[in-house]
Amino acid sequence: MKSSDLGELIALAALWGASFLFMRMGAAEFGPVALSAVRVIGAALFLLPLLKWRGQMDALRRHWRAIFIVGAINSALPFLCFSYAALSISAGLSAIFNAASPLFGALVAWLWLNDKLTRSRVLGLAIGFGGVIWLASDKASFKPGGSGWAIVACLAGAAFYGIAANFAKKRLNGVPPMAVAAGSQLSAALVLLVPAVVWWPHTMPSHGAWIAASLLAVACTGMAYLLYFRLIAHVGPANAIAVTFLIPVFAVLWGWFFLDERITAAMVAGCAVILVGTGLTTGVLKWPSSRRAAQT
């Protein structure tokens, strides 16, 4: 990987990590539904002109049904889940649970697409989900004021990402990525438009909340998509997925620096276990016996 590609990978992780910060900053005033709607509407307004400029609108028209479904399960629903979670748990903790998305993706691929589960991937799933369960049991409380439902929402959001990745692989293989990115944000905007009108906050959000929502839409969604697909083109999807390991790091740091969120030993340990499991599941990390077998 070139130094310029590495720089873009770090920038992408910083942007996606910041999305958890901006959700924390905006969710209380907007509410989860309105904040998610502002996010996808802003991202769609940013990406659609670029799609038009690239002359790829026809791809969006041809595949609009599948793209609409991806928009619902890869943007509208998970954005709602994580915005809801942002009301009661830290940016870093949300991002750590989000790092389980590839685990759900591998599980769905095995159940739905009959993908082979190697010994290394099975071990990764066991370690990763073990870390999720341990961290969730350490943090979750379903008593009034507890974080239990927020953690459930994070895991639901991660599961939606895993389902969407497999659906896109099955139904949108070969479709220009920009068409999927722009079309999915437009679709998510259509899904959330009416609910956002119904649940729009009675009190107009502050300038700070609007700035957070705008950065969430344009920088953390629109620009991040452009960086992600640029990285895939330059270094391939197998290397681009390494961003998964950096997002929680940045989210924890942003939350600590800007919101004075605590970094606990349980968060660090749980994050490490989940990321080891994710690494084994995605193939970024190799179990020693698997590596030796590959060399013989």
Image (spheres, rainbow, N blue to C red):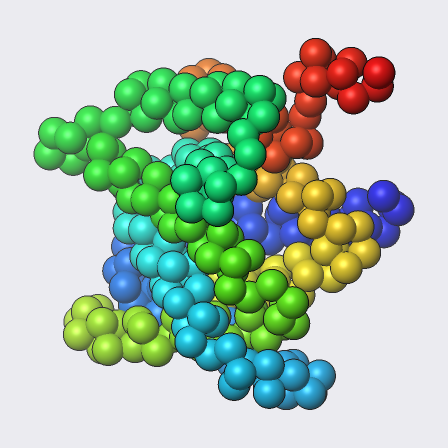
The foreground one among 106 and 135 is 106
The foreground one among 110 and 103 is 110
Q: Residue at position x 24%, y 34% from top?
A: 147
The foreground one among 188 and 283 is 283
The answer to whether residue 277 is visible is no
The answer to whether residue 136 is visible is yes
Q: Residue at position x 54%, y 30% from top?
A: 117
**2 sits left or right of 213 in the view:** right
Q: Is residue 104 above or below residue 35?
A: above
| Quadrant in which residue 191 is drawn | bottom left
Q: Residue at position x 38%, y 44% from top?
A: 159
| Quadrant in which residue 50 is drawn | bottom right
- Tell me how many marks there are: 0
Residue 285, percent from left and from top: 68, 25
Q: Residue at position x 35%, y 70% from top?
A: 37
Q: Is residue 30 above or below residue 101?
A: below
Which quadrant, please, contains the C terminus?
A: top right
Q: Is residue 234 above or below residue 252?
A: below
Q: Is residue 113 above or below residue 127?
A: below
**218 sits left or right of 80 in the view:** right
Residue 258, percent from left and from top: 50, 43
The foreground one among 136 and 83 is 136
Residue 214, percent from left and from top: 48, 68
Which residue lies most toward the left here?
A: 144
Residue 283, percent from left and from top: 66, 31
Which quadrant, please, contains the N terminus?
A: top right
